[in-house]
Image: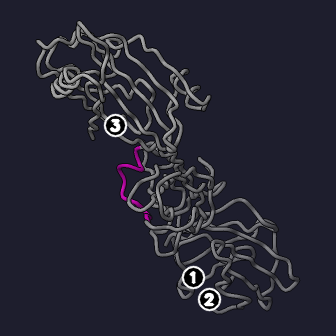
Amino acid sequence: MSRLFYALTVTVLFLCHSFTGRAQYLLTAISPPPQFTHDDLWNLTLTRTNTSDNYTQFYIALRIFNNNSLLEVKTNSAMLPLSNAVTVIHIGNIADVQPFTINYYNATVLQQVVASGGLFPPGVWNIDFTLYGRPSDGEFTELADYSYPLIVDAMWPPMLLSPADGDTVQTLNPILTWTPAFSTYLPGNVMYNLRVVPIFTGQTKQQAITANYPAYQDAGIPMPLQIYPNTAQPLDSNTRYAWQAEGFSGSSSLGQSEVWEFCYCFGNVIDSVNVPLIWYDLQPDNTDNIYLFNSDSLRFRFTDPYLISDSSFLQFELIREETGEIITDNNTCGDGPFPSSRIHYAMDLDGLQLHKGTYRLVISDTKRQKYVMRFIYAY
């Protein structure tokens, strides 16, 4: 956007000379990147249509106004010859317009930022460049100018909270949480996209998040948390997953979080998938041991010599750990446990219609002594 300014003078000769000078000069500027310094603003093109006019010295003035139109910084460049028809100034050749003469006003934060070469703080800034020139027989006058507004938006992307990076979860429905994303200027409610992908052997979490098909992804999440839903692809046992959140205000991205990983894993997992006739050990109390199980017949044994008469009954309770659901309660005989020796028992799971997941089997005898085993059902 160009702005024309004409200086009033008592001499017709000076008025005509100034108008002719302005008509022969054009200044344009390109906005800097979203994060920028004072020097990044110096991205200009100067066009001089008549290099044979009477102007011999030039300089450029940069004025920076705040949102209340108050001047905060004024920078004058070094003297320039402008001997070519087109002069381009950018960060790569900024030394051609240096040293700068910089004046500060109102003792604001911007003074510290510019003086230290730091990034501009959030806010609305009005940038004004003016080209001044002096003929060999006169004073400096304004030849061209260019102004534009700049909005520096402070955006904070979401940051992942839990599960912590590298953490282990033992539920099919982990709660994924992150910090709220934030923008100082973009209007509207902040929504989130979430992506969870499996990590394959040899991959990093960063490679997985960009290359692999998601086990779960969702858009338009209104809160900075999401429970991994039952409608998503179930988590596979002993599998690592990468996950990432991204904030949006309308269609504008507020940035992506870092990539973290978690593992749907269990301590001391004993792989018995390829040994279907294995006897699973019962423990007299809760245990961290867990079996990976792939069969419709569950065979277990008591680790201590345990005598049970043919007339005694074993009661069992099967609990799905992810949900706390009791699959079956206090059943006796039927499909459940029948002995094959004094300490070996078996029970048929086919009729229970189990889903893939983690289960806790609690066996009780007539003396109310309880024995426990945990297993991952992957049949």
Question: Which amino acid type is marked by label 1?
Answer: Leu
Q: In the image, what residue occupies the spot 45% across and 42% down? A: 204
- The residue tagged 1 is 349
Inspect the magenta stretch and tell me whether residue 208 lies in it: yes
- The residue tagged 3 is 147
Q: Nearer the viewer, residue 162 or 103?
A: 103
Question: Would residue 138 appear left or right of 346 to someone viewing this image?
Answer: left
Question: Would residue 330 appear left or right of 349 to someone viewing this image?
Answer: right
Distance between the alpha carbons at the discs numbered 1 and 3: 77 Å
Helix or strand or loop: what does disc 2 sit on? loop
Task: Tell me if mark 2 has few (under 14), some (14-19) or many (20+) residues whose alpha carbon lies within 10 angstroms of its own.
Answer: some
Q: Position of residue 132 (x, y in %)?
A: 30, 20
Task: Tell me if mark 3 has few (under 14), some (14-19) or many (20+) residues whose alpha carbon lies within 10 angstroms of its own.
Answer: some
Residue 333: mark: none
Check whether the beta carbons of the residues at disc 1 and disc 2 lie within 8 A of each other.
yes
| Range drawn in magenta | 207-218
Q: In the image, what residue occupies the spot 50% across and 22% down? A: 117
Question: Which amino acid type is marked by label 2?
Answer: Asp
What coloring was used for the rendering? one colour
Inspect the magenta stretch and tell me whether residue 306 lies in it: no
Helix or strand or loop: what does disc 1 sit on? loop
First in residue order: circle 1 vs circle 2: 2
Q: Nearer the viewer, residue 265 or 288?
A: 265
Q: Position of residue 170 (x, y in %)?
A: 63, 62
Helix or strand or loop: what does disc 3 sit on? strand
First in residue order: circle 1 vs circle 3: 3
First in residue order: circle 2 vs circle 3: 3
- The residue tagged 2 is 335
